[in-house]
Amino acid sequence: MAQPLPRIYKWKQTLTLVLGTSTTVITATNVELNGFLAATTVKTAAAVDTSATTAVKLTDSGGVDVFSRTGLAVNTNTQALLADATRVPLSGLYTVTVTFSAAQTVARATDVSLFVDRG
């Protein structure tokens, strides 16, 4: 007999900001997610400008932002647990975007984890 799939699964990706004088945005496209977004964890990179912040958003294939976290301090770990009433239903392909408030002069990596409840 086949083993049942785990109820919660974790999608994790390290997104690296490539070197550029005006580069502030990195994305992961065509991320397939199905279920309810239950939690997120973001480990932001250190920045050249220590007052810089980052933002993370999840956008559906129709261009609608379904989840976002803004004002995340650089060089930190931030976790967001969503209460049952605020869990975001997901079905299909999504784009994960990380935006730095200031351009960086060296490559930067940010880890994004999405915890999805398949119910």
Image: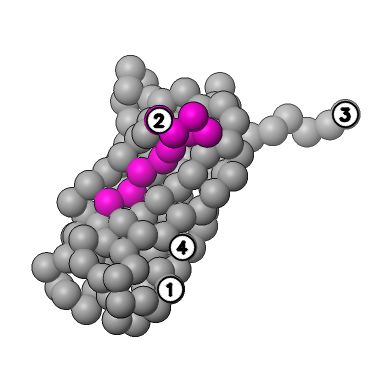
- In space, the residues marked 3 and 2 are separated at their CA atoms by 40 Å
- In space, the residues marked 4 and 2 are separated at their CA atoms by 21 Å
Q: Quadrant for residue 118, please give it.
A: top right
Q: Quadrant for residue 99, please give it.
A: bottom left
- In space, the residues marked 1 and 2 are separated at their CA atoms by 25 Å
What x and y, as percent, mark residue 36? 48, 27
Residue under label 4: 15
What x and y, as percent, mark residue 51? 11, 68
Image quadrant occupied by the C terminus: top right
Question: Horizontal placement of 52 versus 14: left or right?
Answer: left
Numbered disc in front, either 4 or 3? 4
Q: Bounds of the magenta span?
A: 55-64
The residue located at (36%, 43%) in the rendering is 57
Hey, what amino acid is under mark 4? Leu
Residue under label 2: 64
- In space, the residues marked 3 and 1 are separated at their CA atoms by 46 Å
What x and y, as percent, mark residue 72? 21, 54
Residue under label 3: 1
Hey, what amino acid is under mark 1? Val
